[in-house]
Amino acid sequence: MAYPQIAAFARLANGSVAPTRSIAGQATKIGRASHDVTYDPVNDEILVASANAQAVITLPGGANGDVPPLRVIQGPHTQLQSPGYGATVDTVHNEIFVVEGRDRPGEEYILVFPRTGNGDVAPLRVIKGPNTMMKNARNIVVDPMRNLIAVSSRNGTLIFNRTDNGNVKPRAIIKGIGGKFRLIPSKGWLVGTGEDASGKEGIGAWSITDNGEVPPFYLLINPNGNLGGNDIALNPKEKEVILGDRVSVTIYSFPEIFN
């Protein structure tokens, strides 16, 4: 049986290859219900929301083996109960954004913590309530340049102001983006899987300032059919989009969205 881990592979690896590093073990606090990993390149840290630990953990970027976190946000004041999905870092304003409530569809909410928070710390802000339209909310990204938040949900990709607090309505709702996406802050592109007007599926780029049922500005289609998964990561340096599923990782060159 596979054990929970964060595995790192060589960028040009191909085929059935072993990871160059593996972060795993009891000390890491990584559990089976951790479904999202965010890398903070500014501070060389890895952010993981752990549902089993009811915590948000920050690991060193170069960690290998059974390494304890640098910081753990955990405790009754945090309002964390089951944060196994979306978590991200705003390195400009030094804040962490977490989607809470994966075990309570329709009752999800967003918690905002100081990036260097550690222990039983109260959130700085909480976006919560029926007006938010969060249902099956999962993925989250923050655009510090435009001061916006994007959250995936069954009701579409919900756009909020970065500093929103309380029971607020989305300022916009983008339809058509797949459940998971990433952000290119310099361009304002939300990059995820989706379809164009003709129904062709591929990797698309939408503007975070879009609203409504809008087609992607760019769409990259795999002529062989299968894209290779819905979990997504970006490699801006090499202008690549990385898709993952349960057993494989597929890498695409997509320079148009980075240029």
Image (tube, rainbow, N blue to C red):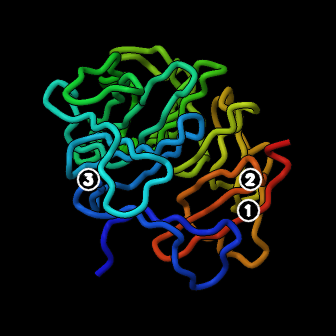
Q: Secondary structure at mark 3?
A: loop
Residue labelled with disc 3: 29
Which quadrant of the structure image shows residue 241? Answer: bottom right
3D distance between C-alphas at marks 1 and 2: 6 Å
Residue closer to the observer: 258 or 27: 27
CA neighbours of label 2 inside 10 A, class few (<14), some (14 to 19), many (20+): some
Question: Percent position (x, y) of residue 242?
Answer: 64, 60
Q: Secondary structure at mark 1?
A: loop
The numbered dot on residue 14 is none
Residue labelled with disc 2: 196
Q: Earlier in the sequence, mark 3 or mark 1?
A: 3
Three-letter code for the amino acid on which mark 1 is drawn: Lys
Question: Percent position (x, y) of residue 55?
Answer: 25, 41
Three-letter code for the amino acid on which mark 3 is drawn: Lys
3D distance between C-alphas at marks 2 and 3: 40 Å
Please, is residue 125 above or below residue 41 in the view? Answer: above
Please, is residue 179 above or below residue 185 in the view? Answer: below
Residue labelled with disc 1: 200
Left or right of 26 on screen, residue 210: right
